[in-house]
Image (cartoon, rainbow, N blue to C red):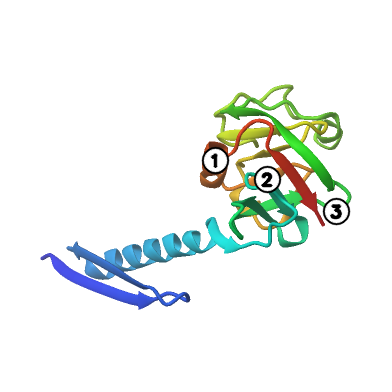
Amino acid sequence: MAVAFNKAWRNMDGSVVVARGVSAVAGRVRAVVVCGALIACAAAAEAREIVPFASEDYRAGTIVIRNAERALYLVGGDGRALRYRVAVGKPGKQWFGAAWIKGKYVQPAWSPPEEVRRDKPNLPDVIPGGSPKNPMGPRALLLDRDQYAIHGTNRPKSIGTYASYGCIRMRNEDIIDLYDRVRVGAKVVVIP
């Protein structure tokens, strides 16, 4: 026997979410639909958002990374910026200052830098693009400083932490979005 159900709840931001479904085993399916909707809401809460941003020091199109916030801002030039949650360098692996995007790559292959290879000697010389073991994710913005990049990740739970050897990690959906918004030559500023 099919059973129809509706479930509604209010998010922390005040929006209302409604889950609807029809099920032969209403209790189990209701739990799955509600849990799935809650997971989607939690993911949306961590997604990029437009925020106020005092940008007198930065031109539109500049990327500003605030390590302490574990946030990347794409400056809009209108007193606002697009904010993304990121993972930044571990203590002792962070860098600060200005850089420029020198290349944009889709499904980049990854070769571990010497420092990573010393810590993890069993890594292969190259991990192909698109491999689930590739830490670069689906896009990479290569910077003109050493071997640093802004890229996706195969470890999404690391976003919002101090996790890398100096690169900036983003959710895969977010690096795809940022990749489409920036150009080669864009300025990147990393501040504490």
Q: Quadrant of the C terminus?
A: bottom right
Number of other residues with Cα within 10 Å of mark 1, as a class: few under 14, some 14 to 19, many 20 or more = few
Q: Quadrant of residue 46?
A: bottom right
Cα distance in 3D space between marks 2 and 1: 11 Å
Residue ID at (57%, 37%): 179
Q: Which residue is mark 1?
A: 181
Q: Is residue 164 above or below residue 52?
A: above
* Of 76 and 150, the residue lying toward us: 76
Residue ID at (37%, 63%): 37
Number of other residues with Cα within 10 Å of mark 2, as a class: few under 14, some 14 to 19, many 20 or more = many
Tell me where residue 175 appears, x and y as whole percent: 57, 42
* Of 171 and 53, the residue lying toward us: 53
* Of 175 and 61, the residue lying toward us: 61
Residue at the outermost right position: 92
Q: Secondary structure at mark 3?
A: loop
Residue ID at (54%, 29%): 130
Q: Give amino acid for label 3.
A: Pro
Tell me where residue 32 appears, x and y as whole percent: 34, 63
Which label number is shown at residue 91?
A: 3
Tell me where residue 1 appears, x and y as whole percent: 10, 65
Q: Which residue is mark 2?
A: 62
Q: Secondary structure at mark 2?
A: loop
Closer to the camera: disc 1 or disc 3?
1
